[in-house]
Every structure is written in C-alpha cells, then in structure tokens.
Amino acid sequence: MSTIYRLKPKFQALLTPTMHRLHRMGATPNHLTVLALLASIGVGASIFFVPNVWAWAVVPGFLFLRMALNALDGLMARTYSQQSNIGEIWNEMGDVISDAVLYYPLLWTMGLGQYPHWLVLFMVTMGLNEMAGIMGKVIGGERRYDGPMGKSDRALVFGLLCLLVLFFPVVLNYVFYVVLVITAGMWFGTYRRINKSLAK
C-alpha cells in the first residue's frame, strides 16, 4: 500500500547538501533529533496557549521542517558512520513524544476536547502504530514503516487540514470525522506492520 514514506529516499537526496553543511558546522544526528523534539514541544505549547487559526497556521510549515530534521538525522548518521544505540533510542522516543506534544494540543483546540475518549484513543493508537513498527526490528527483522497513516502520512494529512481550516473555518465541523478516519487507518497500518514483521 502506498505511503508518503516511499518518497523518503528522494527527499533525503534533496537534503544531502544541507546535511553536509550541518556536519561541517559541527552538528550531529542526535543534535537534530533533540532539536526536532524541542521544537515540537515549543509549537505544541504555542498551539495550546494561543488556540486560534494563526497558531494552527504554523503547523504545515513546521511539520515539513520536522520531516526534514527526521530525514537528516538518519542520513547524517549513515553517511558519517555516527549510528549509536543512544541515537536510535533518542530517534524512536523523540518521534513518539514529538507526535504527542504536537497533535494532542492541536486536536484539543480544534474541538476534540469535547470528545476526550476519542482523543485518547487517537493518541494511544498513534503510539501503538509506532511501537508496531519498532517491533519488526526487535524480533530480528527490520523497522516497519507500512501505511496507511504512518508518521509521514499523518504529517501530510494534518498539514493539509490546518491549511483548510485556515482558509475554510467550516472544516472545523468535520475534524472529528477526519480523526476517526485517521485512527482507523492507523489501526489498519498497525495490523500490516505486525503481519509483515511476523512473515519475515
């Protein structure tokens, strides 16, 4: 099944010159991972404490920046042989924490605060989806990124959603249903990750 993650090699190729410049400046993969995490916390806090369309307006650009940082840290680690166990831990935990601190306040301020149980279900499903991907490597295979609604897919959908809400506020009336669809997609993606991990 198609997923935005398939575009990662081409995206990394475009980022290669930037990666080399950052390395010459003394940046490491872990620096980029921590930067993405801290930036996610900052943007999430801004959304929560300034809940209006202008706070949401920064989300599409930030999600693109975060995807770039996520691509750069792995690319730099492989290119300059800087892979490490602590780097892998930072990478996986950073992604899960970044998702939580960004999407929770975003969805809360978009109206899902009225449906806390559904919001919690979304957050738990998102964490399980990432855990299912990691389990593929834990049991001796490879890290699974199967979609639909993996990290990159979610970033695209929420980026587009924020843009739509910015220009067409009536879209806020349908955010709940969008989240239901995304949650169902994540469950299906989680099933596919587990199934393919066990098939290896």
Image: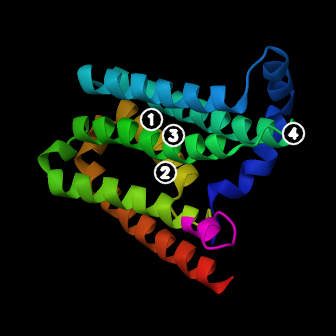
The answer to which of marks 3 and 4 sits earlier in the sequence is: 4
The answer to which of marks 1 and 3 sits earlier in the sequence is: 3
Q: What residue is drawn where x is 82% and y is 36%?
A: 14
The residue under label 3 is: 94
The image's mark for residue 154 is 2
**Residue most toward the left?**
114
Q: Report the Cα–Cα distance between label 3 and label 4.
A: 21 Å
Q: Report the Cα–Cα distance between label 1 and label 4.
A: 35 Å
The residue under label 4 is: 79
The span picked out in magenta is 135-143
Mark 1 is surrounded, within 10 Å at the Cα level, by few (under 14), some (14 to 19) or many (20 or more) other residues, namely some
Q: Nearer the viewer, mark 2 or mark 3?
A: 3
The vertical placement of 180 against 67, above or below, is below
Whole-percent x, y for residue 198 in the image: 60, 83
Q: Report the Cα–Cα distance between label 2 and label 3.
A: 16 Å
Question: Which three-letter amino acid code belongs to the residue tagged 3?
Answer: Gly
